[in-house]
Image: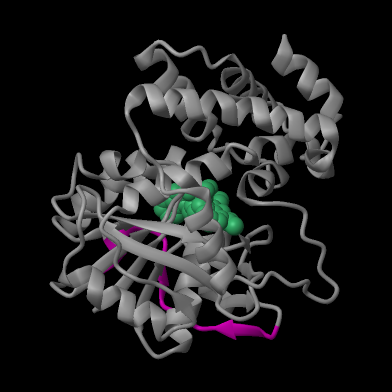
């Protein structure tokens, strides 16, 4: 099996780096300055234990890959980039099995517009990509949890094979029969991404916590109205607790998670697929979701105006959410 990583940022770069380090056949698709830096100097991969440069094969576009029957694609672009990336991939690769190593729950459905074999990968992996050519993984023992399964439910032989390869490359991975239920739990966790991106450490203040509670209460009501069951928080906590050990990296300040990083890099944000998913479910099922809609709007403005992450006092956010 060759694993092609579409979008070699924090998550894609880390998966590619670990697979490459453990002798697996990997190719990265990385665009812009990041792809150019990897091509010129290799991918710099930083963890609590190491800082290495890996000469992983890299291209800028799926057209530059000679596709074969053994290829599997791990899609690790942010959700707002999935449709464009999938269209390019389908044109060049034709039918290829695809794994969505992304947060949110919309990506598998987007990928299924082009691909027959769509798998979900539930990603629990604190990782970072700020500088071109560099990715950082923050969990010390196991690098991350990457459970896999079919979008439509169940799992297949490819999931078994990929999980074995990932397990042998310092990830925890297993086939699960309900991968989208795990991803709905992850979606609930990710509703706080915007609070961190807007308020930074203010996320932990009483006002930040109160904001998050309003977002989660709406989400619980929207999922219940939609008849969607997420894996329990206890199961999720257990899986993380069994494997993730987030430690500091000497000389490195970790500002925040993936949405925080998007703002820090002046990129678009994924919030339309996170809090926006709750707003969508609310509209479809008659549940008011003003807090999530407000946070979605604030994040769109922050990204459009190039606002630095952590600029908004948590009390201001709470006041805006409460209207
Ligand atoms: N970071 C974390 O700790 C973490 C943890 C769990 C889950 N996740 C999820 O994992 C997914 C990926 O997040 P991330 O943090 O890895 O994002 P990221 O660091 O921004 O990496 C995504 C990469 O994909 C590139 N890209 C976008 N469209 C492309 C295309 N058509 N062709 C080639 N490259 C393309 C981006 O380039 P540009 O920079 O030019 O846009 C970027 O380099 C998201 O759904 C995120 O929510 C992240």
Please name the residue shown 44% across and 83% down the image: 169
Figure quadrant of the N terminus? bottom left
Q: Which quadrant of the structure image shows residue 84? A: top left
Q: Position of residue 74 (x, y in %)?
A: 35, 62
The residue that appears at 13% across and 72% down in the rendered structure is 69
Is 83 within the magenta? no
Image point 61% across, 68% down: which residue?
Answer: 133
Picture quadrant of residue 230: top left
Residue 34 is situated, as x and y percent measured from the top left of the image, at 57, 61
Q: Is residue 176 above or below residue 193?
A: below
Residue with the most extreme bottom position:
23
Which percent across, then down, holds residue 242?
Answer: 55, 72
Q: Is residue 23 left or right of residue 36?
A: left
Question: Image quadrant for the C terminus?
Answer: top right
Q: Position of residue 279 (x, y in %)?
A: 48, 21
Using the image, determine if residue 308 lies above or below residue 278: below
Q: Magenta stretch?
A: 49-65
- Residues 166 and 67: in front is 166
């Amino acid at each position: 099996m060759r694993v092609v990583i579409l979008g070699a940022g924090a998550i894609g770069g880390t998966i590619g780096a670990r697979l490459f380090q453990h002798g697996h056949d990997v190719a990265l698709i990385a665009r812009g300055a990041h792809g150019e830096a990897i091509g010129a100097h290799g991918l710099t991969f930083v963890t609590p234990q190491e800082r290495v440069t890996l000469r992983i094969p890299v291209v800028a576009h799926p057209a530059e890959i000679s596709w074969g029957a053994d290829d599997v694609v791990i899609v690790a672009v942010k959700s707002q980039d999935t449709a464009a990336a999938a269209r390019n991939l389908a044109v060049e690769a034709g039918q290829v099995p695809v794994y969505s190593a992304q947060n949110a729950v919309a990506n598998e459905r987007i990928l299924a517009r082009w691909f027959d074999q769509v798998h979900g990968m539930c990603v629990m992996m604190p990782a970072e990509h700020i500088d071109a050519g560099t990715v950082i993984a923050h969990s010390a023992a196991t690098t991350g949890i990457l459970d896999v399964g079919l979008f439509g439910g169940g799992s297949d032989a490819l999931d078994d094979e990929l999980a074995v390869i990932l397990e042998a490359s310092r990830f925890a991975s297993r086939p699960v029969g309900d991968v989208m239920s795990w991803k709905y739990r992850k979606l609930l966790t990710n509703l706080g991404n915007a609070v961190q991106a807007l308020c930074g450490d203010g996320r932990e203040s009483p006002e930040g916590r109160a904001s998050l509670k309003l977002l989660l209460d709406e989400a619980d009501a929207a999922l219940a109205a939609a008849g969607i069951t997420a894996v329990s928080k206890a199961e999720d906590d257990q899986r993380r607790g069994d494997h993730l050990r987030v430690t500091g990296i000497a000389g490195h300040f970790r500002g925040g998670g993936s949405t925080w990083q998007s703002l820090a890099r002046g990129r678009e944000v994924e919030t339309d697929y996170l809090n926006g998913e709750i707003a969508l479910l609310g509209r479809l099922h008659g549940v008011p979701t003003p807090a999530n809609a407000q946070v979605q709007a604030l994040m769109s403005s922050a990204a459009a105006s190039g606002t630095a992450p952590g600029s908004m006092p948590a009390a201001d956010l709470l006041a805006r959410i409460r209207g």
